[in-house]
Image: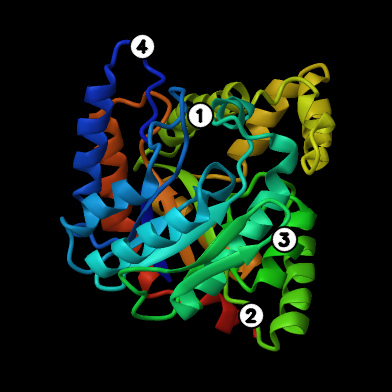
Amino acid sequence: MQVGMGLIFQATDPKRTDRDVYSHELKLGDLAEPLGFDSIWGVEHHFTDYTMCPDVLQYLSYFAGRTTHVKLGSMVVVLPWHDPMRVAEQISVLDHQSNGRFIFGMGRGLGRVEFEGFGVDQNTARERFMESAQMLLEGLERGWCEFDGKIIKQARRDIRPRPFKSFKGRTYAAAVSPESSEIMARLGVGLLIIPQKPWDAVTAEMTNYRQIYRQVNHTEAPPPVLAGWVFCDHDAKKAEAMAREYIGGYWNTVLKHYELVGDHLTRTKGYENYGAMQKMLTAPGGRDAMVDFFLGLQIYGTPDQCFERIIDFSGRLGAETFTGVFSYAGMPYDMAEQNLRLFASDVVPRLKTHQPVRAAAE
């Protein structure tokens, strides 16, 4: 397996300045290559303390210059918030700077505060994403962009510097709803999966995605990238307690940032699939039940337990890459570094020697 690490720059502790958050998270990022990780990832978010990485491609350019061989993944660039022509240029620059180490992950976004902050109608997000993705994927392969869609209008212009190798096989998209999975299959991209639904639903959607991908692209779909929140400690009881405090704390930041307690998503075109989650959260005991459910989908425990959970989850999906997040929800940085180092020393080597799950399943 390939093993990556992600930084999310959460500023949910009011006692810390944004400067403090950034300096410590970047120090953790500098450990990725020496600790043996295969890749480093970042996520895009705006305007709140949820995740302070408004330009994931700029962030990855920083690490392109500080590393020599780790791959650099966006998890994700939210296309409806961007001019896709500019994204194509930024991607090509980053790929040149990193000697072709970039992994392009894209998504359509969910946070109302972000759509409103950019003056983008969230009801158009799916259509904006599909048109932007189509233009980008075609443009990165041929070296120039041109598109005449309902929303995206782009006169033919070259991407300079020109992309110097194909992005096929290293392009992924985040997909949560069944409809999104079908869209990604038709676009010919892999999936980024952060488990947040029952496994039977996820595996059913993966099966449907693979069938459509095979029909449209006449080849097998690439194995997905699995991501998750990690707390690793030699003491199983401590790991569980800390996971409940910090991974559970992270889940509460998700509720706040995405305004999941309410019903606005059920009234937003393309996001109706979130209605079931919103209803669950408003039911008696719904929040506590969702914390327990979310914890059950993440990676915590002793090194042995973390390894076993990753093998279990990746086997369900056919994933051959796991990306962990080790610092979140105001976790003290000495604790985050200890978490990261223990995982790197006691779990990463075992994952790297594990037989690829796709081959094991065939």
- Residue at mark 1 to residue at mark 2: CA–CA distance: 33 Å
Q: Secondary structure at mark 2?
A: helix
Residue 350: quarter of image: bottom left
Tell me the number on the disc at residue 250: 1
Q: Secondary structure at mark 4?
A: loop
- Residue at mark 2 to residue at mark 4: CA–CA distance: 47 Å
Mark 4 lies on residue: 14
Quarter occupied by the N terminus: bottom left
| Camera-nearest residue between 275 and 207 | 275
Cβ–Cβ under 8 Å for marks 2 and 4? no
Which label's residue is closer to the chain start, 3 or 1?
3
Looking at the image, is 216 positioned above or below residue 327?
A: below
- Residue at mark 2 to residue at mark 3: CA–CA distance: 21 Å
Q: Position of residue 63 (x, y in %)?
A: 23, 53
- Residue at mark 4 to residue at mark 1: CA–CA distance: 15 Å
Mark 3 lies on residue: 181
Which label's residue is closer to the chain start, 4 or 3?
4
